[in-house]
Amino acid sequence: EDQVTQSPEALRLQEGESSSLNCSYTVSGLRGLFWYRQDPGKGPEFLFTLYSAGEEKEKERLKATLTKKESFLHITAPKPEDSATYLCAVQAWGASAGGTSYGKLTFGQGTILTVHP
Amino acid sequence: DGGITQSPKYLFRKEGQNVTLSCEQNLNHDAMYWYRQDPGQGLRLIYYSQIVNDFQKGDIAEGYSVSREKKESFPLTVTSAQKNPTAFYLCASRRLAGGPEQFFGPGTRLTVL
């Protein structure tokens, strides 16, 4: 069974204080690992897809990296507007039914990030 | 602008009532999904559909039903058989010929009174 564990559950930072969020996963053949940002009361907003170990992607103050067992979301010099819940999800190549891949995502419980001015 | 819309944003239901949540997309995406989100838990898959007139159960389909009569629409009915329906419901979609990432709507918060 695919599993995703995110840590820490909550993270409080001062504006400008860089840090990292962790996503550990076990999956039977990784097709993709995804990072989403979710603001309170809203739907998740897609950030990144990572496909293989060693891959990195960046967007503004965010950088996502991937190893064979975990992914990190690095936040450099965060601002208060970066405050949100960050979700990690994985999709396995074996996520199929009736021989057709249906793209099931397995999500972690999220990390609540709060950045204080 | 292309996107996914869900309505209503808030929904209140009395015990024993069925309610239907709307999900519409104009992204020309093939596959559509329904997830449920509870505090402190990851999103869980309820139902999914890859083509019109076809859909499959996800991990927690009991007490829910769906239809896919049009490519753009994938409504979810929460029936009285669902024992704990209070949750945040999210609809997502993706293009089968594109990347594996799914794109989400704004969500519907259902509260059972």
Image (tube, coloured by chain):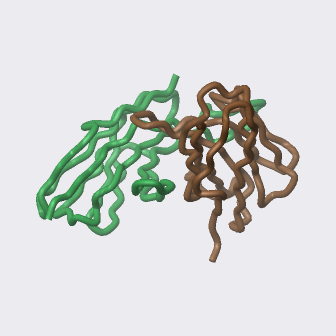
In the rendered image, the vertical position of residue B102 relative to residue B76, given as above or below = below
The image quadrant where one finds the N terminus of chain B is bottom right
The image quadrant where one finds the C terminus of chain B is top right
Query: In the picture, residue B17 is in which quadrant?
Result: top right
Q: Is residue A43 left or right of residue A63?
A: right
At horizontal 51% and vertical 40% (from top left) the residue drawn is B37
At horizontal 72% and vertical 34% (from top left) the residue drawn is B64
Q: Which chain is brown?
A: B
Q: Is residue A46 left or right of residue B83?
A: left
In the rendered image, the vertical position of residue A82 relative to residue A69, given as above or below = below
Q: Which chain is green?
A: A
At horizontal 68% and vertical 40% (from top left) the residue drawn is A102
**Is residue B15 among the parts visible in the rendering?**
yes
**Is residue A37 among the parts visible in the rendering?**
no
- Residue B93 picture location, percent across and down: 65, 54
Query: In the picture, residue A84 is in which quadrant?
Result: bottom left
- Residue B11 picture location, percent across and down: 62, 50
In the rendered image, the vertical position of residue B108 relative to residue A89, given as above or below = below
Query: In the picture, residue B67 is in which quadrant?
Result: top right
Q: B70 or A97, which lies in front?
A: B70
Residue extending furthest toward the bottom: B1
Q: A6 or B111, which lies in front?
A: B111
- Residue A40 picture location, percent across and down: 40, 54
Residue extending furthest toward the top: A1
Q: Is residue B56 left or right of residue A73?
A: right
- Residue A58 picture location, percent across and down: 33, 62
Q: B81 or A72, which lies in front?
A: B81
| Numbered-mark total | 0
